[in-house]
Image (tube, helix red, strand yellow):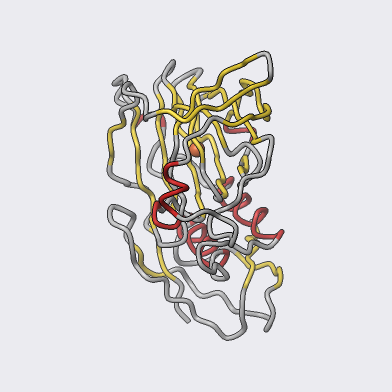
Amino acid sequence: MVWVVCLAMAGIGLRLQGGGGGGARKERLGKYSPYAAERQLTTLEEPEEGGKVGALFGLCNLATQNMVEGKLQLYEGDFELISTCLNDITPEEFGFPPSRDDGKPIIDYVDIFEEKNFTACMFKIPAGSRLPMHDHPGMYVWSKVLWGEMEVSSYDRETAQATPRDKSFPSLPSQALDLRPFKVKTKRDREVWRSEDGVKITTPTEGNIHEFRAVTTCCFVDVIMPPYDFMQGRRCTYYEINDREDGTWARPIRCPADYVTRSLKYIGETVETIEG
Ligand SMILES: [Fe+2]
């Protein structure tokens, strides 16, 4: 197959800085020949060295290079590139085929890689369990079911919220304390996601408040940029959705007491860096 890679600059050799604990080992990701002085799309053969997970890591790094003060400047092509790459990675390459499920009724969490500007993680949810309604303020999320089926309900704010780092955004303490309910509209109502449905994208304004409920035991990957960062105004809030006469409301709540995860070690393909 042909990999489609978006290159940022000519003559660059990227050395990705290691970061974040618990992520995959980072080594070397083959050599991409940069083509143009300006960011543009090009096509390259599949890298000889480094696997697809490493390529995903490299794409995320390129996509977040224009991040300023926590604000992303993603190009149209970034969405498709990351989706294409993520869609092509198998459960085996991520180190979580169905055979890894030990059958215990607990949600497993695996940190695939974790960097300052992006992260990737994996969840296995036992049938009947759920990731409670939560949000990703100011963040983009690429989600891909690796196996199994899950039901997704998601909501959008009815009125736009100031995004983190906007000049108009209130100071952090104000933001952190702003737990008022707000009106939402339904984006997805118990939509079933399977592996063959491919990658689903959450944006800061579309589907950002969502709940994943396992129809069968299932496993999915989230690629997230930028990551949660309380000090940058990106904290995870949990919600209760209330249908009322005057509309649908999202009410911030504490993390549900029954939501417990178990961290497992990442054993998939290693993540490798690009060197010129
Ligand atoms: Fe989420």
Which of the image's four quarters has the N terminus?
bottom right
Q: Residue at x 31, y 31 (%)?
A: 261
Would you place residue 83 above or below residue 10 in this image?
A: above
Q: Is residue 261 left or right of residue 88?
A: left
Give above or below for 55 relative to 161: below
The foreground one among 137 and 128 is 137
Side of 144 where 18 appears, left or right: left
The one nearer the camera, 83 or 65, is 65
Q: Looking at the rendering, which quadrant does residue 96 occupy?
A: top left
- How many labels, in total? 0
- Is 229 placed left or right of 141 in the picture? left
Provide residue 218's location: percent of width, then percent of height: 46, 27
Q: Residue at x 36, y 67 (%)?
A: 27
Q: x and y percent of residue 182 in the render? A: 59, 31
**In the figure, 33 relative to 1: above or below?**
below
Instruction: Name which quarter of the figure residue 103 lies in.
Output: top left
In percent of width and height, residue 124 lies at 40, 31
In the depicted structure, whether residue 74 falls above or below residue 100: below
Q: Residue at position x 34%, y 55% from top?
A: 24
Q: Residue at x 62, y 40 (%)?
A: 200
| In the foreground, 170 or 65 | 170
Q: Nearer the viewer, residue 231 or 180?
A: 180
Residue 160 on image: x %, y %: 67, 44
